[in-house]
Image (cartoon, helix red, strand yellow):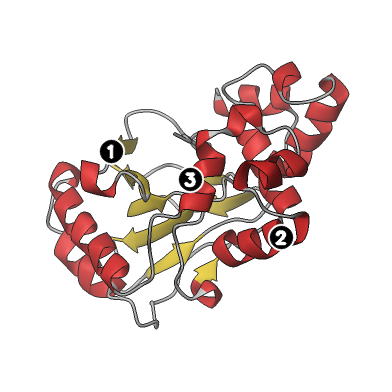
Amino acid sequence: MYSPTRDGFSVRGSAVRYTELPPPNDLSQVIHCFWELRTLATLPEDFQYHALPDACVNLLFNLVDTQIAGITALHTEATTLNLGTSFHYVGVQLYPGVWQGDRNEILNRYVGTPYRGALPLVQTSRRLVSLEFADMTHVLSEHVWWCITHGHVYANPETACILSNLDAIRSVADMAALLELSPRQLQRTLKRLTGFAPHDLLKVLRVQQSFQKHYLDLYADQAHFTHAFRRAIGYTPGQYRRRFGV
């Protein structure tokens, strides 16, 4: 199954902790992971978080201020978020295509204001604040089940098929053939399910694959790879490895 790479962190070491935990089996078709990013001591400088496009949607909870929560996703380009010197975030990373709630709620930037939407994000955040991360997963799972029963999240066979067959997809035409759709039907389907046009979704997934596969398995040559990587990630592959140790 699709496994997007971790975002880039400007600070590593004992003062910052990032942890991922897998979902329970009954939610493994919609959740990639639960995650926690927190400081264990005040940092000497602001923490720069380089968020990468991966076509996933995150349910995000700020446990320093439980009023602050949101739904986040990037489109085709990375962005750097300044998280300050002290923070504690917890989230649920949903696979591409499973979020079917209000797309107008999705933010592609830093979440720093109280949540005003209809989802019980703030109530869930309040339940999380006194727990250790390992004990939060049942609360986060209950929140996702609430989203499922209210039609905001569901396992999506079309995008699941794409994610399960990435190695066989070299073009938008391959994607359409895999789903047995015409190009126009594919355009409408993916826009509705993911918010992406097929070409944009393929670009994001291909760059994500490049963290795990040789670039010549995905691109015509090194120049094509470097250009696509820099446009999506904001750095050349070499620059990104040196800065973030990936």
Q: Earlier in the sequence, mark 3 or mark 1?
A: 1
Q: Is residue 60 above or below residue 8?
A: below
Q: Amino acid at mark 3?
A: Ala
**CB within 8 Å, label 2 to label 3:** no
What x and y, as percent, mark residue 232?
72, 43
Rendered residue at 22%/55% (across/down): 141
Report whether residue 65 is seen: no
20 or 180: nearer the viewer: 180
Secondary structure type for disc 2: helix
Rendered residue at 71%/26% (across/down): 237
Q: Earlier in the sequence, mark 1 or mark 2?
A: 1
Secondary structure type for disc 1: loop
Q: Amino acid at mark 1?
A: Pro
Is 167 displayed left or right of 145 in the figure?
A: right
> Residue 98's image quarter?
bottom left
What x and y, as percent, mark residue 34?
31, 46
The quarter of the rendered structure image containing the N terminus is top left
Mark 1 or mark 2, whichever is nearer to me: 2
The residue labelled by disc 1 is 22
Q: Is residue 74 above or below residue 122?
A: above
Report crowding for label 1: few under 14, some 14 to 19, many 20 or more residues within 10 A (C-alpha): few
The residue labelled by disc 2 is 187
Q: Which mark is residue 103?
A: none
What x and y, as percent, mark residue 27?
27, 49
Q: Amino acid at mark 2?
A: Gln
Rendered residue at 45%/55% (across/down): 156
The quarter of the rendered structure image containing the C terminus is top right
Rendered residue at 53%/51% (across/down): 158
Secondary structure type for disc 3: helix
The residue labelled by disc 3 is 160
